[in-house]
Image (cartoon, coloured by chain):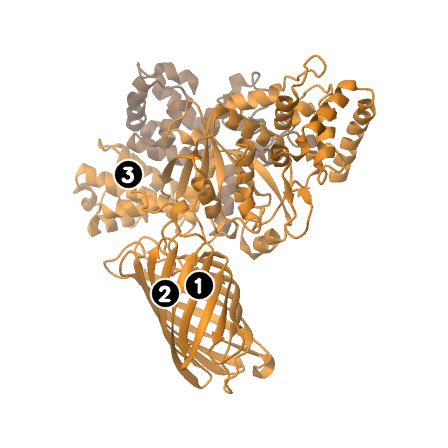
Chain colours: A orange, B brown
Amino acid sequence: MRGRRFLLLLMMWLPLAVSAADNGYLKELIDHARAKHLAQRPEWLNLLHYKPYPYRPGWRSLADDPAFFNAPDGKTDAEAELDATLASFFSDTQETDKIQNPQCRFIARYHWLKGELHFDPALLPEQPCKRFYQWRAALNPHQITLVFPAAYLNNPASMYGHTLFRVDAKDQDEHTRLLAYSISYAANTAESRGLIFAVKGLLGYYPGLFTMTPYYIKVREYSDIENRDVWEYQLTLTPAEIDRLLMHVWELGPIRFDYYYFDENCAYHLLSLLEVARPGLELTDQFRWWAIPSDTVRAVAETPGLVKQVIYRPATATVIRQRLRYLDSLQRQLAKDLAEQKTPLTDARVSALSATDRAKVLELAYDYATYESATGSGPAADPQHMRDLLLARSGLDVPSQRPDVPEPAVRPDQGHKSSRLALGVGSRGGRQFQEIGLRPTYHDLMDDDGGYTRGAQIEFFDMAFRHYRGDDSLRLEHFTPLDIVSLTPRDEFFHPLSWKVNIGWTREHFADNDEPLVFRVNGGPGLAYNVPGSYDGRSVYYGYLEAVLDVGKRFNDDYALGGGPTVGWLTDLTDRWRVNLYARSWRYGLGDVHDSRELVLAQRYSLTRQSAVRLELFRQQEFQDYWNGGEISLHLYF
Amino acid sequence: MLKKLAVIAVIAAFPAGAMAAGSSDASGGCGVGSKVFEGQRGVAPQVLAMTTNGTFWQTVAVTLGTSGCSQDGVVKSNWKTAMFIDSNKDKLARDMSTGSGEALESLAKLIGVKDQDKAAFFRATKENFARIFASDDPTTDQVVASLKQVLSADGQLAQYAQAI
């Protein structure tokens, strides 16, 4: 299919190439473009998404679709592509519902080249491009907003959060934003969850496509179903810049890019659109290896003069939590019972409430039943019951009791940066050591939560090197490609399951004091609860039950398989000071039978937003040996 | 839970009936509220073949179906209100029960309710909640039809009945 399209394009292009010889004006334009070195200009490179290879010299376009190029070797040859693009503009193809003239198909390129080369309309007639202009008129663009739904651990496709653009219309206001359109870039697959997605996504298996959807459908997806708080960064793009962005989006509509989970993802490609919109912005260069959505949001926010205003939109669950604060325990219980149909609407306790309180209880009951049904954490909503709740509410002559949710103190762009360097000194079993650790990305439970989703730890490729006094070498202490922990407290209204999964290499202490690296996979479910009197996970106690597999040559039978519980208490003593006290006891019952236990007191004190000190004290056991230890380390985020 | 999410996402992406109407609907019906819109069918632009030769938003074709609801990725103007109601029915019900909220604001915007009439519009939808959402699980057509009736019966708001 792709091959055929390519051939078709080639056939369309060939006659043009032939006629170029006797098209004096085309030759003049090409000479002019050469003289001005247009093919090397950032505007052209951005329009074609030419990027240097990360591993070797040379350039190529990130677009993986021959339809994006006019020259057969357009993917790698910017100059040939420019010549061929100029040639294509002489096409007299008339626009229909199925095909476009190249001037319209590549309308952003056309307008940039026209501006640079001052096309003579007598020699190169301009096409009307009605479809594009109708489309733009329907969008009625006035402002571009960068939308950032925060991290959502339970969907690997958007574990880090996600970014998209919203095209705000001229006649739209804060109350009617639902009517705007969103532009997003995503892997085009129904398989957006699970390990398969992660693996295929890492390898660039999926086609990535830019899509346009009414914003109300996106709100439903993120805010209502996945319960992610959404941050909206209104950008200062001028009308001319918005025009360029939309022209380029129009070009990209049907174009396939290979989707890469880490680098060529939604966040990266949206930045590239901004670079097209506002020449001179250099946003993608800093994300050559990976692009975490929150980091790209930070890059946008830190660009002087690019962000106008930031708006916070709480998720349904966040609003429910806020509603709960305005009710006493009796009313809360009543709302829950009403939602779950355990109490009839005619209950005397309902009619005993004041109209305002009744409105609060009914609204909460409806929201909660909707939430339970939408997220699948409760039974599907009974439509008759839902209507009864609303009917009862509509009969009360009081305004909406939906409370305002205060904006979190720290926005996603203001949180700690996601790479971290750790420098530590410590002692273990009486032996002193120095340690250097590097975590490329992105957040752990002991980091400051500001701007991040609380209770969501995601670390990739965390590693530490340690040097023991008296040794003459530095050794790899651990290397953890994947470490995810979800720690979400349960309460009377919300019953999330916590879980963790960890894959990597770590040092194991054997009886003869040998400490080789072993490969370890562990993980399992857990439960967490708020400490009575605390809220929002500022002080939680928790337990996990994990299975663990260790593999290494030193083990009898080369492996040890076991598991066991971890219990702990994680609390913020002040805004800067966090403590995690936990005990873990694993019994390896298969393979090399042994025990592994530890008791750890970990503390973090934030110095600035981008630096912290940690102090860890521990007592550990592997096989028959026990030892005590401690480490103090400085953590720098960059 | 994840399965359910997927199901909901699909429902969100394919407005009720859009699939059934499909591309065989040569008159360009969008599938949403097609009964209510019967009179306008001839006016509706012809069916758009979306995925051919890559000049359209392929994924919008995937998102909205090739049912004629959208052109080049934007919802055709004559389907805007029906699409919105269809995709936001639950939110509209909730908003109407309190007479406020952004789904209701957006609906008012779509049917062109002037600022000075907004309060009356919000109040009317709240007071007539039982009529507008007359059954447990009304179709978009039913909601549109009853909303039309409610507005027609209101001196101040009758002018908007035609816009739905």
Residue A66 visible in the current orientation = yes
For label 1, the crowd category at 10 Å Cα-Cα, with few meaning under 14, some 14 to 19 and many 20 or more, is many
A307 left or right of A351? Answer: right
For label 2, the crowd category at 10 Å Cα-Cα, with few meaning under 14, some 14 to 19 and many 20 or more, is many
Q: Choose the circle earlier in sequence order: 2 or 3.
A: 3
Please say if A114 is above or below A268: above
User: Residue B65 location, x and y as percent?
Assistant: 58, 33
Most extreme residue toward the front is A35
Q: Are marks 2 and 3 on the same chain?
A: yes
Q: Chain of mark 1?
A: A
Q: Which residue occupies the foreground of this view, A501 or B5? A: A501
Give the residue pinned by disc 1. Answer: A422
User: Residue B51 location, x and y as percent?
Assistant: 66, 32
**Local secondary structure at mark 1:** strand
User: Residue A423 location, x and y as percent?
Assistant: 43, 65
The three-letter code of the residue at mark 3 reads Arg
Q: Chain of mark 3?
A: A
Dividing the picture into quarters, in which one does residue A536 lie?
Answer: bottom left
User: Residue B44 location, x and y as percent?
Assistant: 56, 19
Q: Are marks 1 and 3 on the same chain?
A: yes
Q: Could you tell me which quadrant the C terminus of chain A lies in?
A: bottom left
Give the residue pinned by disc 3. Answer: A402
- The number of numbered discs placed on residues in the rendered structure image is 3
Residue A614: give its label: 2
Q: Which residue occupies the foreground of this view, B119 or B115? A: B115
In 3D space, how far apart are the residues under numbered discs 1 and 2 (Cα atoms)?
9 Å
Dividing the picture into quarters, in which one does residue A354 lie?
Answer: top left
A86 left or right of B134? Answer: right
Identify the residue shown where x is 55% and y is 49%.
Answer: A192
The three-letter code of the residue at mark 2 reads Arg
